[in-house]
Amino acid sequence: MYQTAIDNFTKAGEMDANQVAVWDSLGEAYSGLASSQTGDERNKSYDQAVEAYKKSLKAIPDQGPTDPWGAARSTEAAKPDASKTAKSKGKTTETRTTATKPQ
C-alpha cells in the first residue's frame, strides 16, 4: 500500500515539483512505510520522508501576509528553513455538536 503511494507521489513530483501537497504526502507515505520496517530499511525510509518534507517546505510560495493555509504572518517574515523545521506527526481534530430544538 505505502509503496504504491510512494510510486504515485514520486511521479507526481516529477510532473510538478512545486506542489506542496505532493511532497507532504510523499513524506507521509515514507513515514508510514518506515513504521512497518526495522533496522536500516526503517532509517532509510525515515530519511526519505525528511527529504520529501524539506521539498514540501521549499515549495511553499511567498504570498505576502498569508501562507497557503491562511495563517497570518508578517510580510517581513521569511519562509521556514527546511533544515530546521520538523514536521509534527501529532494532529488534533475538533468536534463540534449543535443542539437542535425539538419540533
Image: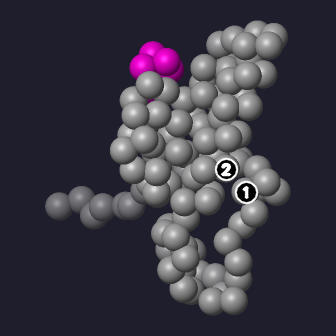
Measuring from the top left, give residue 38's x and y in whole percent.
Answer: 76, 10
Q: Is residue 70 above or below residue 100?
A: below
Q: Residue 56 versus residue 100: which sits nearer the camera?
A: 56
Which image quarter is the C terminus in?
A: bottom left
Figure label count: 2
Residue under numbered circle 1: 82
Q: Amino acid type of disc 1?
A: Ala
Q: How crowded is mark 1: few (under 14 residues within 10 Å), some or many (20 or more)?
A: some
Left or right: 36 as drawn, with respect to 4: right
Q: Which of marks 2 and 1 is nearer the N terminus?
A: 2
Q: Which residue is drawn at 52% across and 70% down?
A: 61
The residue singled out by tag 2 in the image is 54
In the image, farthest residue toward the bottom: 75
Residue 21 in picture, x, y percent from top left: 47, 50
Q: Residue furthest top?
A: 38
- Give the residues drawn in magenta, as a range: 1-5
Residue visible at 58% across and 52% down in the picture: 56
Look at the image and tell me whether residue 90 can be seen. Answer: no
Rounded to the nearest angstrom, the CA distance separating label 2 from label 1 is 5 Å
Q: In this view, does 102 lie to the left or right of 63?
A: left
Element on which disc 2 rests: helix
State if disc 1 and disc 2 touch (CB < 8 Å).
yes
Task: Using the rendered view, name the quadrant where residue 33 is placed.
Answer: top right
Residue 46 in picture, x, y percent from top left:
72, 29
Q: Give SS at disc 1.
A: loop
Residue under the image location 79 percent in, 13 percent down:
40
